[in-house]
Amino acid sequence: MKPRAPAVFDRLDTLEWHLCQRLAGFSIHRPWLWSLRLASKAGDWPIWVALIAGQPWLHGRDEGWRLTFHYTLTALVAIAFYRLVKTRLCRERPFITFSSIACQEPARDRYSFPSGHTMHAVMFCTLVAAHSPWLLPALIPVAALIAISRVGLGLHYISDVIAGAAIGYAMALASLALIA
């Protein structure tokens, strides 16, 4: 038996589908589609692994390794929470619910809520703001493009991205409060 998403998602899907369809429609432009796919791939893991691994180089050995551990632990807790929410709420991706929304990138699973890519992007931006704010001018545009790519590729609704951002921000703030 297929899990059923809460009724609130039915209402949100109906409210959001037209805008999601319109945003995904911009993917007919090859340079834009290429940019979205590149951002999506970067948001899978490479950029965050590089950021975590670079902490000793950015902050010196002792502080850098402490931050490496902090960022890694925060990411692992966020992933566990994200998977718990995603597998309990079971909101289907827009391209599954609405055939008029093209999927421009293979999905890892059938559920969209919340956006894990956006969660990590906002979480790491928040952590970087606390420890290396000078990196933010380079990181914020990448994080924004990652978030946009989720809707532009037809993989998420806008509310999935907003929820992912809120969870990422909350996870980062909680982890910063715990080490303060």
Image (spheres, helix red, strand yellow):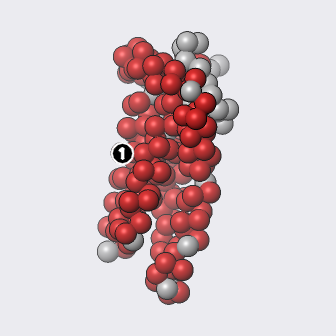
Q: Nearer the viewer, residue 12 or 26?
A: 26
Where residue 162 sits in the image (x, y, percent)?
38, 38
Depicted 46 relative to depicted 105: above or below: below
Query: How many badges with numbers are in the image?
Result: 1
Please say whether residue 91 is visible from this viewpoint: no
Please give left or right for residue 15 compared with residue 145 in the image.
left
Instruction: Look at mark 1 in the image and give the residue it sits on.
Output: 166
Picture quadrant of residue 100: top right
Label 1 residue SS: helix
Quadrant in the picture for the C terminus: bottom left
Please give left or right for residue 62 compared with residue 44 in the image.
left
Depicted 112 relative to depicted 48: above or below: above
Please say whether residue 59 is visible from this viewpoint: yes
Give the crowd class for mark 1: few <14, some 14-19, many >=20 residues within 10 Å.
some
Q: Amino acid at mark 1?
A: Ala
Please give left or right for residue 70 compared with residue 103 in the image.
left
Where residue 51 sits in the image (x, y, percent)?
53, 66
Residue drawn 38% across and 60% down? Answer: 137
